[in-house]
Image (cartoon, helix red, strand yellow):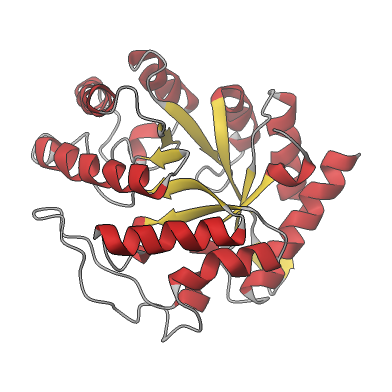
């Protein structure tokens, strides 16, 4: 990365209580559903988020697809302008639905995800994160996912948007399955490594095995009673750095306390201290 500050990003998911509303996905039509007060009425609009991120010293932003109220060109242009005016890079559009590993939905969901990659391109995003699949990691499910991911890469060959997937859901619940799928896509699909998706005694060893292949990262910490599990978070960062990870840390916060920006700031300070050392 170009500089220390470029090592930090924030996701709209970390501010979902401030945003409040979400917009349900319709995988059959691609339509954006009406606003739902999923997390309350909210305090800000998505168009306000780039400036708010910049005010907190963060110049890289990820946006969940369900936070977008429209896929119309005029709205996407307005959001892209808000990013530019705030001096914030659209790091990733997180495509939050679809299952490429389910034979009942794979063809439909490939087309649906394809449309959202187009949204990422219109927003000038660096990446589009795709869910590889949600099925158990049978050979058939992994092959079906690889087929869908390769098809999406083929459709967007030459695009400035880098397609990535994530160590998430049953399909990619182990480093072996992550490696298999990345190998099967032959460099066409990158990896967004996530601290929070794996747990258990072998978590650190498993993360160490994949973070050398990650280009972006969801750095999610655990909070209990408003206090961060600093030991676990620091260990995850150290594992990633030792594995050769050199990309941005997208600060992921999801806890009732402390407040959202306070939680993000705690995460950032801890990682910043580690990187500085």
Question: Is residue 112 at least partly visible in the picture?
Answer: yes
Q: Is residue 267 left or right of residue 35?
A: right
Q: Which residue is painted at 60% across and 37% down in the image? A: 203
Residue 266 at x, y = what percent? 76, 63
For the N terminus, give its image quadrant. top right
Question: Is residue 11 at least partly visible in the picture?
Answer: no
Residue 244 at x, y = what percent? 69, 23
Viewer-side residue, 211 vs 261: 261
Residue 117 at x, y = what percent? 30, 41
Q: In the rendered image of this protein, does residue 170 appear above or below residue 58?
A: above
User: Which image quadrant is residue 105 in?
Assistant: top left
Q: Which residue is painted at 25% across and 29% down in the image? A: 152
Viewer-side residue, 184 vs 162: 162
Viewer-side residue, 275 vs 88: 88
Residue 106 at x, y = what percent? 14, 36
Q: Residue furthest right?
A: 277
Q: Is residue 11 left or right of residue 239?
A: left
Q: Is residue 272 left or right of residue 252?
A: right
């Amino acid at each position: 990365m170009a500089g220390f500050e470029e090592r930090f990003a924030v996701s709209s998911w970390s501010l979902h209580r401030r945003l409040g509303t979400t917009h349900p996905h319709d995988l059959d039509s691609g339509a954006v559903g009406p606003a739902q007060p999923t997390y309350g009425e909210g305090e800000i609009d998505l168009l306000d988020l780039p400036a708010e991120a910049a005010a907190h010293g963060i110049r890289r932003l990820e946006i969940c697809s369900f936070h977008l109220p429209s896929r119309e060109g005029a709205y996407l242009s307005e959001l892209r302008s808000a990013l530019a005016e705030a001096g914030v890079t659209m790091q990733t559009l997180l495509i939050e639905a679809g299952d490429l590993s389910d034979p009942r939905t794979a063809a439909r969901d490939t087309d649906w995800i394809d449309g959202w990659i187009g949204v990422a391109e219109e927003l000038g995003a660096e990446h589009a994160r795709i869910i590889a699949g949600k099925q158990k990691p049978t050979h058939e499910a992994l092959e079906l996912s690889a087929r869908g991911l390769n098809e999406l890469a083929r459709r967007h060959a030459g695009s400035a948007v880098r397609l990535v997937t994530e160590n998430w859901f049953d399909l990619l619940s182990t480093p072996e399955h992550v490696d298999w799928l990345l190998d099967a896509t032959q460099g066409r699909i990158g990896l967004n490594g996530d601290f929070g998706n794996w747990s258990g005694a072998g978590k650190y060893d498993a993360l160490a095995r994949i973070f050398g292949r990650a280009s972006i990262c969801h750095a999610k910490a655990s909070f209990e009673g408003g206090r961060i599990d600093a030991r676990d978070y620091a260990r995850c960062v150290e594992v990633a750095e030792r594995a050769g990870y050199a990309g941005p840390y997208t600060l992921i916060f999801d806890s009732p306390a402390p407040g959202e920006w306070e939680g993000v700031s705690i995460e950032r300070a801890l990682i910043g201290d580690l990187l500085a050392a």
